[in-house]
Image (tube, rainbow, N blue to C red):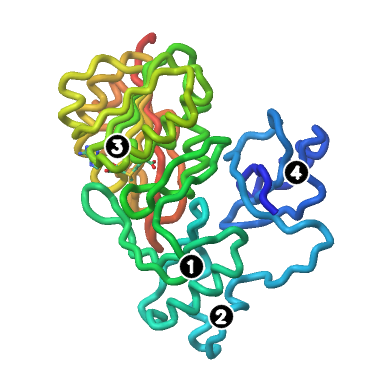
Amino acid sequence: MRSRAIRVARSEGETARRALLDAGKLRTDLRIRVDDGEVVLPVGEGSLPVAGAVVEEEFIRQGEPEAARRYQDLVSLPPDRRALLPRAFDVIGDIVLVRIPDELESDGPAIGDALLRFVPGARLVGADGGVHGTDRRRSLRALAGKGGWRTHHRENGIEIEVDVEQAYFSPRLAREHARVAEAVRPGETVYDLCCGVGPFSLAIARDARARRIVAVDHNAAATDLLRASLARMAPSVPVDVVEDDVERFLKSAGPADRAILNLPLQGIKYLPSVSRVVRPGGSIHYYEVTERAELDARAMTIMDRVGGPREWVIRDHREVHAYSPSSDLRSYTFERRGDA
Ligand SMILES: C[S@@+](CC[C@H](N)C(=O)[O-])C[C@H]1O[C@@H](n2cnc3c(N)ncnc32)[C@H](O)[C@@H]1O
């Protein structure tokens, strides 16, 4: 059954479980899950004594027999091919996306059918061909199920309108969306640059500490989806949704207290312009795919693009998730020296 839940890093799982149990917030009627390096704890309503991404996910009731522990058990394949089955898949609303290795191309429909049966509430399963072009749209092929690629996804207590084919969205960033929203201080002006369907803006708007949020993306499908989410949410904070090129927007933009730039493979070219609009005391949250072997040198390069250590301090950089065998998606937080 579906329940509100909190995702925490596996290393924090036991501490979180105890804290939630002590606060009477842990749903003891449902089984805790471990998934993709994180523990997913089913919780009740209200505020939680634990930090993490608040999501809505499927759980098995305590005492209920498990039909299959893994979707792989539902695919009939010879053992050598079975070993190639992908372990991970993403669930976005009622859509399941999975990357099919070339060797299993012809088994796509069988894998889709297994996932459709395995993931509770799944409507459509797609083969994920990765994101492409400047809009970072996903190439998709329907494997099983019915209907189109539009859905709504719940994360951090927010309903996000998503079209997995027309605009970028990744459920693997839920913790980042929540973490950045938590950092926003009362009265801030926040620029969400390359906002996509707006998960950062929506989380910040929900918390209602910002004075104003401006969300910018050049993909009209993404900005339309964000407007649809805002229409449903009706936040008390004004959110200006701007369909524009980020560089063009920044040319005439006023000062901001915080800027978010999540364009991991090309965003570095915009950092000098982003850093110019951030006030003293303000912050930039920048996302980039970084080779692990080049981590230290890369942090220095990024610092130079922001404006150098005389004016900026790197407050934090961390792995968000693995991107390839040798690289990670990382988040870098810079703060401009001086008082706000
Ligand atoms: C990786 S997605 C991030 C979306 C969103 N911030 C999130 O976390 O889900 C990058 C987004 O940048 C947008 N984008 C790429 N280049 C851009 C540009 N020059 N100006 C405005 N938006 C751009 C794409 O359309 C895409 O929606």
**N-terminal of the two: label 2 or label 1?**
2
Q: Is label 4 in contact with label 1 (beta carbons under 8 Å)?
A: no
Mark 1 and mark 3: Cα distance apart in space: 31 Å
Which residue does the numbered mark 2 point to in the structure image?
Answer: 75
* Numbered disc 1: secondary structure: strand
Which residue does the numbered mark 4 point to in the structure image?
Answer: 17
Mark 3 and mark 4: Cα distance apart in space: 35 Å
Residue in the image at 28% along x and 15% along y: 255
* Numbered disc 3: secondary structure: loop
Which mark is in front, 4 or 1?
1
Which mark is in front, 2 or 3?
2
Q: Is label 2 in contact with label 4 (beta carbons under 8 Å)?
A: no
Give percent across and percent down for residue 336.
Answer: 34, 19
Quarter occupied by the C terminus: top left
**What residue occupies the far bottom of the structure in this picture?**
78
Which residue does the numbered mark 1 point to in the structure image?
Answer: 145
Which residue does the numbered mark 3 point to in the structure image?
Answer: 194
Which mark is in front, 3 or 4?
3
Closer to the camera, 87 or 168?
168
